[in-house]
Each structure stands twice: as structure tokens, then as C-alpha cells.
Amino acid sequence: MAARLVISITTQDIGARITTRRRVPDGFRDAVGILESWEGGVLAVRKKDGTLVEIFEETLVAAKVVPVAPPRPGRM
């Protein structure tokens, strides 16, 4: 059974943690983080390492809201 790729995020999800998959020249690339903005066809996703990824809307093939990552053991 093949996976079904769905884009189920909107501008209403700004501030939520999302996962994305987008087309790049050599295949696909994923990004998980907080959706900081979505303006002019460009999504800005802040990854947990602090980097900001800009994703052109037309390159998205899948995206959805995901739960906040659970805390790692030993880190409080």
C-alpha cells in the first residue's frame, strides 16, 4: 500500500509544530519545527536547533501539524 501525501496545514496553524516534505532538485527534504509565518507563498519553519527554513509553498508535497516533542530523559 502506497503512502498518501497530504498537505493539511493552513495559515491558521502559525505557532504550531509541523512536519513538512518538499521537493528539491535531488529528491525530497523534510523539516520539522514551529510554523512562524506563511506569507507571499513562503513558509518559515523554525527548527529545534534554531535555524529558520524557508519553504516555497509550491514545493510542498506533504505537511501536517504534529504534537510537541516529548522531553528527553535526563533533560529538565
Image: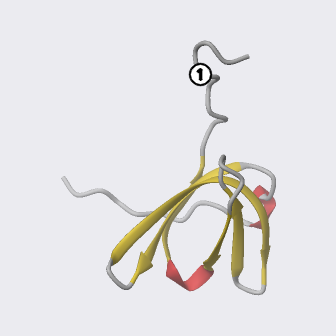
Residue for point 43% across, 67% down = 29
Is residue 60 shown left or right of residue 71? left
Tell me where residue 10 appears, x and y as whole percent.
71, 65
Residue marked by disc 1: 72
Spot occupied by residue 17 in the image (x, y as percentages of width and height): 68, 47
Q: Position of residue 13 (x, y in %)?
A: 76, 56
Of 36 and 64, the residue lying toward us: 36
Could you tell whether 37 is left or right of 19 in the image? right
Q: Is residue 50 above or below residue 70?
A: below
Depth check: 73 or 70 in front? 73
Q: What secondary structure is found at the residue carrying circle 1? A: loop
| Residue at 63%, 36% in the rendered image | 67
Extreme-top residue of the structure = 74
**Quadrant in which the C terminus is drawn:** top right
Give the residue drawn at x 77%, y 87%.
40
Q: Nearer the viewer, residue 32 or 52?
A: 52
Q: Amino acid at mark 1?
A: Arg
The percent coordinates of residue 60 (x first, y second) are 52, 74
Residue, far left: 1
Q: Residues within 10 Å of mark 1 (few under 14, many from 20)?
A: few
Q: Is residue 62 above or below residue 60?
A: above
Q: Nearer the viewer, residue 44 or 38?
A: 44
